[in-house]
Image (cartoon, rainbow, N blue to C red):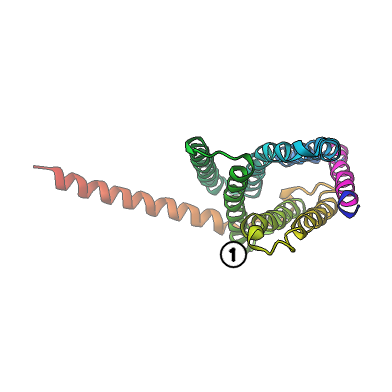
Amino acid sequence: MFATTLWLLSLVLESLLLVQAFRGKLIRHYRLFYSYLLVVTLRDISLLPIYYLWPRSYGYAYWFSAYLTVVMGCGVVWEAYKIALSRFPGAARMARNVIAFIFVFSISRLLVKAWDSANWIPGRTTLETERDLRTVQMGLLLGLVVLFAYYGIPLGRNLKGIIYGFIAFVGVTIAHLTFGTYLAESLRFLWPYVISIAYFLVLVMWCKTLWVYESASETATDSRLEMDYQSLVSATKKQFRAARSQLFKAVRP
């Protein structure tokens, strides 16, 4: 009963967030985040009757739908970087390229691994895939937080809520996927409750921080980030020129 109540309350909060996104026009600014939230909401709505009416099929429906939500979560991370670095075009361009490469490489590696696996099991394979991709998401988001903390740049109320909430939920999910199987059998039943409570609290945080749109331009900016990026680019170009000069000298007869 407690789990069902928490499930229904989470659906209510998800629906409120989506409705407010249209009313407050937040969806124009955080399209990938709200697309992710919409997919998660539809997934929860569809899984609820399966859980009670066709319990034997619930596991398959849950694991297969998990692939979509994990990939959509990668989109949320990419959008967070895009918005956070929108005032720093040089750093934003480099970050987008690096993040795109990391996600494409990670997903490709996992797909190849699943394809070559002789014993492909939906639950176990999806668990490993979700754990690996969630770890990448966590690392990238923490990197963004550390970067802005180092330069003293505020993220803004909306983006801070999205990032911190996503970090909290992803952190609990990684802990579950990594250590859940090591718990004693008598304690494993607690994990679904921990995840459900954590997700509910994240939704409460999102409702609080995403009820009204806050423009990123209203927050302070710091030019040091862009200056450091330009210095890095300049130093890298010098290293390439020096390396090319040494190569020409080595091959010249």
> What secondary structure is found at the residue carrying circle 1?
helix
* Left-right relation of 253 to 3: left
What x and y, as percent, mark residue 182? Answer: 63, 62
Crowding around mark 1 (Cα neighbors within 10 Å: few <14, some 14 to 19, many 20+) is few
Q: Is residue 66 above or below residue 149?
A: above
Q: Is residue 39 above or below residue 134?
A: above
* Left-right relation of 153 to 118: right
Of residues 187 and 139, the one nearer the viewer is 187
What x and y, as percent, mark residue 13? Answer: 87, 47
Of residues 51 and 6, the one nearer the viewer is 51
Q: Residue at x 49, y 57 (%)?
A: 228
Of residues 223 and 34, the one nearer the viewer is 34
Magenta-span inclusion, residue 8: yes
The residues colored magenta run 5-23
Number of on-image labels: 1
Determine the residue located farthest toward the left in the rendered image: 253
What x and y, as percent, mark residue 192? Answer: 77, 54
Residue 35 lies in quadrant: top right
Q: Residue at x 47, y 52 (%)?
A: 230
Q: Hey, what amino acid is under mark 1?
A: Tyr
What x and y, as percent, mark residue 21? Answer: 83, 40
Q: Which residue is mark 1?
A: 150
Residue 220 lies in quadrant: bottom right
Q: Residue at x 44, y 55 (%)?
A: 231
Magenta-span inclusion, residue 137: no
Picture quarter with the C terminus: top left
Q: What secondary structure do most residues of the magenta stretch adopt?
A: helix
